[in-house]
């Protein structure tokens, strides 16, 4: 009884001082902690793995890993998975075949003795199924990964637009891109580096995750050419999401004004390295991209980036969602000013 009275008072205080929390609004960390103690909640973590992508989805029924960082950051990936006590990965989804997205996959599936010695926690990790975008890549790393999947007899499926994965607990993952025609075209001819429309990034798996009234758009490294195709193929109401995972680490190849406007997110997550040697080449997130998020109505406090915020965790009960960054840094204004001074748009 006392517990119910306390919770009622807490909700009343929250309503009076914080306003009514509605779908698409980002709650504070107090709500995060309460949500994590409840059953049936969805938890999505953008892992702090340096340059690259790796997102962990936990539904209470399944654990799903989307991308696996790059080869040189194996230690960061294992560290993050151990922190979150990940053992069985029910579904490993690889958005595309670039090294900073598939770099840790082979290690998770079949670690070498050297890797096991260096990262003992790998002994506890297993992978049940692997999903990819169906685009055949000729790099040695991609070939060796596919060989390992076959050798370990792990079920593998290529996803295409229209496919939907069931993550359990009412969480669905609907693939929007690439289309069957796109994949067949790319696989029918040698890779042409001058064909931006069909480059490796533009073949990235793009999918909308839904859990009751909550939604999040996963984009891999999808660039503006494929963003345009998605806009042509779907109604705006089908693209609207509460959270956008920034395409291609917040670089100018992606997150066009039209695409971000159609997604109309209230929160954006960006995975970008803070390593100095990456700053010169990448410098993500870029000024123009941040301006596009702001123009779409995303508040500065609701733009999160791993290089400043560390691992970023979203929790949702299917109605509301909350965001908990490891580091609470108000970085957007400072970073945009830095970009203006260095004229790196």
Image (cartoon, grey):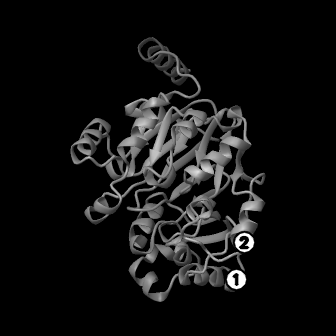
Circles 1 and 2: CB atoms closer than 8 Å: yes
- Secondary element under disc 2, as helix, strand or loop, is strand
Q: Distance between the residues labelled 1 and 2?
A: 8 Å
Q: Which residue is the extreme one toward the top?
A: 16
- Judge whether residue 325 can be spotted in this image: yes
Image quadrant in which you'd find residue 24: top right
The residue positioned 45% from the left and 18% from the top of the image is: 14
Q: Is residue 212 above or below residue 62?
A: above
Count of labels in the image: 2
Q: Mark 1 points at which residue?
A: 150
- Where is residue 135 drawn, in percent x and y? 67, 69
- Res. 156 mark: 2
The residue positioned 33% from the left and 55% from the top of the image is: 283
The residue positioned 66% from the left and 41% from the top of the image is: 231
- Where is residue 260 drawn, in percent x and y? 54, 38
- Where is residue 79 drawn, in percent x and y? 41, 65
- Res. 209 mark: none
> Taking 287 as reference, is 135 left or right?
right
Image quadrant in which you'd find residue 212: top right
> Taking 6 as reference, is 142 left or right?
right
- Secondary element under disc 1, as helix, strand or loop, is helix
């Amino acid at each position: 009884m006392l517990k119910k009275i306390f919770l009622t008072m807490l909700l009343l205080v929250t309503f009076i001082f914080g306003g009514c929390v509605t779908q698409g609004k980002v709650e504070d960390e107090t709500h995060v902690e309460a949500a994590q103690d409840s059953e049936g909640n969805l938890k999505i973590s953008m892992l702090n793995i340096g340059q690259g992508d790796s997102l962990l989805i936990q539904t209470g029924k399944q654990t799903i890993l989307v991308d696996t960082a790059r080869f040189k950051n194996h230690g960061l990936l294992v560290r993050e998975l151990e922190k979150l006590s990940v053992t069985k990965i029910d579904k490993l989804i690889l958005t595309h075949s670039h090294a900073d997205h598939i770099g840790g996959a082979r290690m998770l599936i079949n670690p070498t003795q050297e890797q096991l010695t260096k990262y003992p926690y790998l002994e506890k990790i297993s992978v049940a199924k692997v999903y990819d975008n169906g685009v055949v890549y000729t790099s040695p790393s991609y070939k060796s990964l596919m060989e390992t999947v076959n050798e370990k007899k792990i079920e593998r499926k290529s996803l295409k637009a229209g496919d939907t994965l069931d993550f359990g607990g009412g969480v669905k993952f609907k693939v929007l891109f690439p289309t069957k025609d796109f994949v067949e075209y790319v696989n029918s001819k040698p890779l042409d580096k001058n064909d931006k429309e069909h480059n490796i990034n533009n073949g990235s798996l793009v999918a909308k995750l839904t859990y009751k009234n909550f939604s999040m758009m996963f984009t891999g490294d999808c660039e503006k050419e494929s963003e345009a195709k998605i806009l042509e193929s779907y109604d705006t109401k089908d693209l609207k999401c509460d959270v956008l995972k920034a395409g291609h680490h917040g670089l100018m190849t992606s997150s066009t004004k039209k695409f971000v406007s159609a997604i109309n997110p209230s929160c954006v997550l960006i995975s970008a390295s803070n390593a100095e040697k990456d700053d010169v080449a990448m410098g993500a997130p870029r000024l123009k991209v941040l301006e596009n998020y702001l123009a779409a109505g995303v508040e500065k406090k609701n733009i999160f980036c791993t290089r400043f915020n560390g691992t970023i965790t979203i929790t949702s009960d299917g109605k509301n969602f909350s965001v908990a960054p490891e580091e609470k840094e108000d970085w957007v204004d400072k970073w945009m000013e830095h970009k203006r001074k260095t004229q790196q748009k």
